[in-house]
Amino acid sequence: MKSFSFIFALLSLPFCIANTQDAVHKQLVELAVAGNGVIKLDPKSFDLITSPKRNWSAAIQLTALDKRRRCLPCNDFDPSFNAVAKAWATTSKKNRDNHFFATLDFDDGQVVFQKLGLTSAPVVQVYPAVEGPRAPANGKVAPIPYDFSSGYEASTLAEAMSRYTPVVIPYSDPIDWARYSTFAAGLLAFTVMLRFIAPILQSRWTWATISIGLSLIMTSGYMFVRIRGSPYAAQDGSWIAGGYQNQYGQEVSVIAFIYGLLAFAFLMLIMVIPYQMSPNRQRLQVYLWTGVIMIIYSILISIFRVKNRGYPFKLFL
Amino acid sequence: MLLFRSLLCAIGLAGVVYAKSSKGDSVLVVVEPKQQDNYSIFFNGLREQGYDITFRAPKAETPAVIEFDAPSFAHVILFAPDTKILAKDLTPQSVVDLLSHNTNVIVALSSKQTAISTLAAEFSLVLPPPGSPLMSYFPERTDPATVVPVPVPASHPMLTPNLPPVWFSGVPHSLGNNPLLVPILRAPSESFAAEIDGGSADALVDAAERGGEGLWAGSQLGLVTGFQTLNGARITWVGGVDIFSDEFANKEVVKGLKSGNEQFVRDISAWTFHESMVLRIDETTHHRVNSTTPLEQYTTNDQIVYEARISSYDPKTTTWVPYSGLKDLQLEFTMLDPHIRTALLPVKGQPGKYSVTFRAPDRHGVFKFVINYKRKGLTYLQSSTTVAVVPPRHDGYPRFLSAAWPYYTGAISTSIAFFLFSAIWLAADSRDQKKGKGHKSE
Amino acid sequence: MPEAYPLPSNLSSATVTNTASLLRIVTLALISGAAIASRLFAVINFESIIHEFDPWFNYRATRVLATKGFYEFWNWFDPTAWYPLGRVVGGTVYPGLMATSGVIYNLLHALNLPVDIRNVCVLLAPGFSALTAWATYMFTKEMKDPSAGLLAAAFIGIVPGYISRSVAGSYDNEAIAIFLLMFTFYCWIKALKQGSALFGTVAAVFYFYMVAAWGGYVFITNMIPLHALVLILMGRFSNRLYAAYSSWYAIGTLASMQVPFVGFQPVKTSEHMAALAVFGLLQIVAFAQLVRSHVSSQQFQKLLFIGVVAIGILGAAAFGIMTLKGWIAPWTGRFYSLWDTGYAKKYIPIIASVSEHQPTAWPSFFMDLQFLIFLFPAGVVVCFRQLRDEHLFVIIYAVMASYFAGVMVRLMLTLTPVVCVASAVALSTLLDTYIDPTEPEINDDTVSESGASTASAPAPGANGTSHPTTPKKTKKAVPPPQSTSALGQIIAASRSSNNKPRPKGIFGADTRLMVVFNAMCLLAFFVFHCTWVTSSAYSSPSVVLASTNPDGSQHIIDDFREAYYWLRQNTQEDSVVLSWWDYGYQIAGMADRPTLVDNNTWNNTHIATVGKVMASSEEVAYPILRKHDVQYILVIFGGLLGYSGDDINKFLWMVRIAQGIWPDEVQEPSFFTPRGEYKVDDQASPTMRNSMMYKMSYYRFAELFGGNAATDRVRQQQLPKVGPTLDYVDEAFTSENWIVRIYEVKKEDPLGRDHKSANAFSQGKKRKRTKPAQRRRAIL
């Protein structure tokens, strides 16, 4: 008899599990709808959504949005996460209910943070389904952390998350109307102004300035700063980055200015002074600009010596 | 650079012509001197076959098995199952070392826990708990239950067909899933392994439960099992040393029928010492269809002929004779994965020659002709030849493409038009030039 | 007319010109000598050896060409590269370099000069640098005059920006490419000036040579069309332009398609579309000109406008459609990453991982070009002053090249020539002005008043873009040259000869002396700089490293060759060596062994496989190794010597590239400590510590320090006391300074066990008793 009841219990076990799971699932779906795509978690619901018998997958953002936590990345990243979740909420119901986006704030669930041994935020973990058709083939159900190395953009997040969702997340970057409108306005203004500014456009010296400016900026390492995203100056205010293969934003302007000044001095000597028809003024100018060249050049060298310690040469200073 | 490599089997390279074995005829027997005579029939049989046998006590240091990293005997027989610790050059490690030096070994086990029995695990043989030999109460007989008559499989490739049952006394072992194992003799289905005095069935079951291994019983247990290492050395595990003994050899199974022990042990020693079931690849060649010289590199979609000559060892004449008996030989043409896998069938009328013709894949790269023939008991046939398959040469492509007609026409028409234009232009230049032309034409 | 200093007057003009030309020739010869000599530091300091990585492949290919002949080279299938895929070398290489040195080699042998092919290869680059100097001279001569040309030649001869890629031994495509670049441009300018189809054809021929020599030919392919386009937009279309461009494009494109590696790209890929489009545009404009000669101007305006607009729209639409249809391949990653600079790091880590694809910081600009870098803007302005067609070319070139050089270090090479040309123009103008002895006579200061006052700011709208050779009627309305400012007048005076020139000149000798002396100082300093940079920075063959002993003497670190020769001497000829792709060419060249991957990174998956082997644990890696028949693994380890360019520092790239293919087997974050640091000490993450790369780098490293803590000199971190253990590979060789470590992959265990348990057994460890597979239960 005992054994019989036991067997009965055995038989009924899967059903009741299924029942509880269904209940939890329904609950989660409602929460998701309520939070328009994002489930706001607390420790209890966290355990529910990450239950070891889940037949759904979930992307959970563990963050600390409170001002007091002073987590700037969290606040940068949060909108992206919400945007992606929102985009996911627009998919068809049967897909939508198989994957959840949830967020847990540090202040709501410190225990969870301790349990997961998290010391930093934000963190996004994807919990793949354990049971059901969407359980991963390789059987790896451990939470997968999202790699932030590619930045906080929503698009990259959506791309990464789509690997775990039943269908690709239909996320698309919002159209930047402001940019387009300003661009269009500029274009319009340009066309209107065209007849007035035409002489300027047709003057070779406009183009000369433009091209010289361009090449000066480029040759003083603008692209380096741009690509490497190096700061304008160091925190301690020093504006020259140590090291030969490195530089700060401020160096670009300084070096470009020095180059420009030197080039200008040469131009004066070449193109202006010869037409100066008063000997004394001319002589004065010659001495002036030659002096400028010598001084500025030696300054340039001394700056370069800061960058490249091994450089053996120097001029006056 | 010559990309030609062939891993012929080591068999026969060390072949001594007058030995019965294809691997040399020096045998070391490790046995207690006083027990030495119990196996005289077996040893004399070996001597008659032309082996020279050296005896050595289990604890003795000399003669050394391996000297200067070279094995000093072609075969080793370990008949010291009860010795707890053998000499230091017969540790389990050194036995494995022997095998990797292509020395063949026959190991006898006993129900005692010895260093050798720990070695069995390396060959994925699992021994029953210590002190539990094989027992069987069937058939009804006067002998103790631990002396069991075991029926020999009627048709086993390495045994002489329908031998009478053999007497066995010793431990069984269960076989792991190692593909290199060659089961030779299985336990009778009604036999089991247990402590000698564990008489009652309940005691037996309790023991089994305690061990958590279930019953050591049934025909799945092995008694004599061969093992062939990847480098071709052979080792045979025998559950009990008595199977070789004179006593069992002369003992009758039923009235008037002598047991099969004598012939059986000779068969297994023949297999272990590379007398029977020994094959080798003499040579492999490959060439294009209707040519004979092997190339270092073939062009994609070539028709390639691959040939292999295989011979087997004949212990009677101690010679290698061509062998066409293999029906399931396969050739693989692989680059990372087999691009082609085809049957390599014997050629009619040319004994020992196997050949196949196939089209090289339409994929350039470094390919290998691979023969990898592993069958239980037989020596492994392995051969791998590397060749390059290259795309056609720049002038190997078709010169004229019908698909290119638009371009042909375009080019031709343009040049014709240009010619006409210049001709007309020159002609219509000026009057006197025309006159000059006219002048010439006259 | 007064003179600052007397000139000999009793010379016939013939004598002067003859002497001048003689001097020019002598100077050019000297410049060539200097250019070659300054590139021989590498040979003198070290030896006559091939440098770095790619040159080793070029050298190997050249040997094949020299020994087996051109056709064999063309059909060469290299089974030892990219094992087991092999590499069709003939179709995947720019043969120009090898062909060149092959020709030289055969020529010398025809002259019974038995020169070793290696020396030909080593000295090819210096030789061609002399030619480059000459080509630059010709080019600059077209810009200004021979004196400027000589300056430019001198600059390009010794400027580090070019030496960096052309020292003796750096036997790479760039060695000859720069000469071809300059000469093609020279021919183009010549063709444009004279409107000669002949020079256009010569340009096309050299363009073909360039295509056969260097992938950078795309720079020409877009530079010349851009120039033509700008000319058209400025209303400077002329039959000369038409003749030059058409002949260049037609012949050049057809010729370039003969190179197997290029094939049909010129008509299929976006990089080449600009040239095609401009070609079409030229035809249209030419046709328009034709029409104009028959229609009255008023209608013509309309017609032209409508026509051009319509054609433009049509063309754009066609291009778009074809791109969508996939008939035109989109931009290849390398070129695309030039514009969208974030692209490479995200999508093609292999390209991003190459050091010479990194952006350029300003010090390296200054290092490579020194005072030319601020002189060339002046030169560009001088070009603007008299805006002839060829000057436009220099201007465009300068702007584009300085952008590219900013994005990628290696493209500094394309910037260097134009910098030399422009600054030569500037400097020679300066010298012309200040050496010329004639002094103007003084007149009233009124004009110069304004001149001095407004001189500092170049006033816009000085005058239009009219030009002696432009057609009278251009699309743009040309305002009559009204000179509002002194500068305006100056330029007007300097450019157009029809209105009378304003008096110009320098008073006094001291001013002249001052300026000339200053210039000379600059030049002298430049020479010192170049010599120092060349000898110290650019002359080390990274195959052999040099360090200085305490006593200042040079100490040669020769681990690479030691290891490669060990492989060559001690391993089977066909044993496959696995290493990271940087060393593929060197292994093939020096050790002559098959490699899995090498420096022409054409198969991302194969490279990712190697990355996976290095990044994963032994058990995972072993089957892959066996499958690829790998017998030796070679890793570079700088921890003992402090050689920073070792594999542990490149490890993250391997991980990234492997992750690109197997995202769920290899994950970059798991190689960092929980705090997100890249560490090798005892805090290193378990994945890191179990990876093949880590194990093979630090295997038995701790023993070297005998008890006390082992420190990695590169990472500056303490290694754990107990080093890693290896089961599936054996240490085969470790070079003197541990820079190169070679491991042998074990064969399968004869008993069919996995190596871990086999090792455990041979070390006498008891294996736990396994239960029998098959059981029977008691039925009660």
Image (spheres, rainbow, N blue to C red):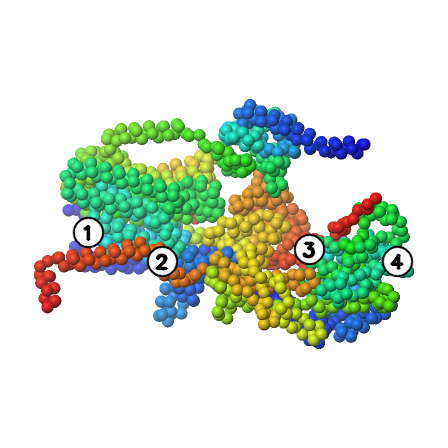
Label 2 sits on a secondary structure element that is loop
Determine the chain carrying the residue at label 3. Answer: C
Kindly state the secondary structure of the residue where label 4 is placed.
Answer: loop
The residue furthest top is A34
Separation of residues labelled 4 and 1 (CA atoms): 141 Å
Q: Quadrant of residue B229?
A: bottom right
Of residues C171 and A20, the one nearer the viewer is: A20
Task: Output the chain of dot 4.
Answer: B
Q: Which residue sits at x=53%, y=52%?
A: C580
Q: Which residue is mark 2?
A: B401
Lower sequence index among marks 3 and 1: 1
Residue B131 as seen in the image, left or right of residue C526: right
Q: Residue A244: percent from the left, percent from the top?
A: 46, 44
Spatial distance from mark 4 to mark 2, Cα to Cα? 88 Å
Query: Which secondary structure, mark 3?
Result: loop
Q: Is residue C684 above or below residue B301?
A: above
Q: Mark 1 belongs to which subunit? A: C
Q: Is residue C488 left or right of residue C180?
A: left
